[in-house]
Image (cartoon, helix red, strand yellow):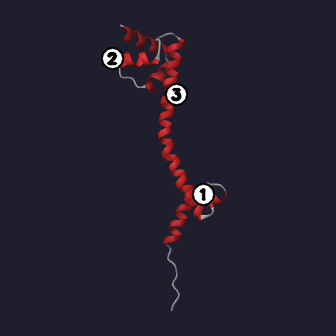
Amino acid sequence: MTRIKRGYIARRRRTKIRLFASSFRGAHSRLTRTITQQKIRALFSAYRDRGRKKRDFRRLWITRINAVIRGDSVYHSYNKLIHNLYKRQLLLNRKILAQITILNRNCLYMISNEIIK
């Protein structure tokens, strides 16, 4: 029987995985099994944290808006401001409102006066 040489497909797959994990530390960048485990873990964490980032930013914007509204007594609460914005059909999302509260408070006062009218 002649000797069968292994092909390059498995080696190509391993090098592709190694390129992904080249920045990992220790055995996580050297051993094939741990590389595959860490790749799965890294991709799962990236997927999970993309959703978490959206959630965290929304919470930050709400906190900023609420702090400015209560501090300057523009409105009693964030909840009533958003409710009245929707009633008046002034469709401003929370990101834009948070930027307005930080950068241009006069504009926020104009918006609140528009709601009150």
Q: Quadrant of the C terminus?
A: top left
Closer to us: mark 1 or mark 2? 2
Q: Of marks 3 and 2, which one's residue comes earlier in the chain?
A: 3
Disc 3 marks a residue whose amino acid type is Leu
Q: Position of residue 7 (x, y in %)?
A: 50, 76
Q: Which mark is residue 22?
A: 1
CA gap, disc 3 to disc 1? Answer: 34 Å
Q: Residues within 10 Å of mark 1 (few under 14, many from 20)?
A: some
Q: Is residue 67 left or right of residue 92?
A: right
**What residue is shown at x 53% (from left), y 70% (from top)?**
11
Q: Nearer the viewer, residue 90 or 67?
A: 67
Q: Of marks 1 and 2, which one's residue comes earlier in the chain?
A: 1
Closer to us: mark 3 or mark 1? 3
Q: Position of residue 101 (x, y in %)?
A: 49, 19
Disc 2 marks a residue whose amino acid type is Lys
Q: Are marks 3 and 2 in contact (CB under 8 Å)?
A: no
Disc 1 marks a residue whose amino acid type is Ser
CA gap, disc 3 to disc 2? Answer: 24 Å
Q: Which mark is residue 60?
A: 3
The residue at which mark 2 appears reads as 87
Q: Position of residue 31 (x, y in %)?
A: 62, 64
Q: Nearer the viewer, residue 10 or 76?
A: 76
**What residue is shown at x 52% (from left), y 16% (from top)?**
68
Looking at the image, is 42 positioned above or below residue 98?
below
Q: Residues within 10 Å of mark 3 (few under 14, many from 20)?
A: some
Q: Are marks 3 and 1 in contact (CB under 8 Å)?
A: no
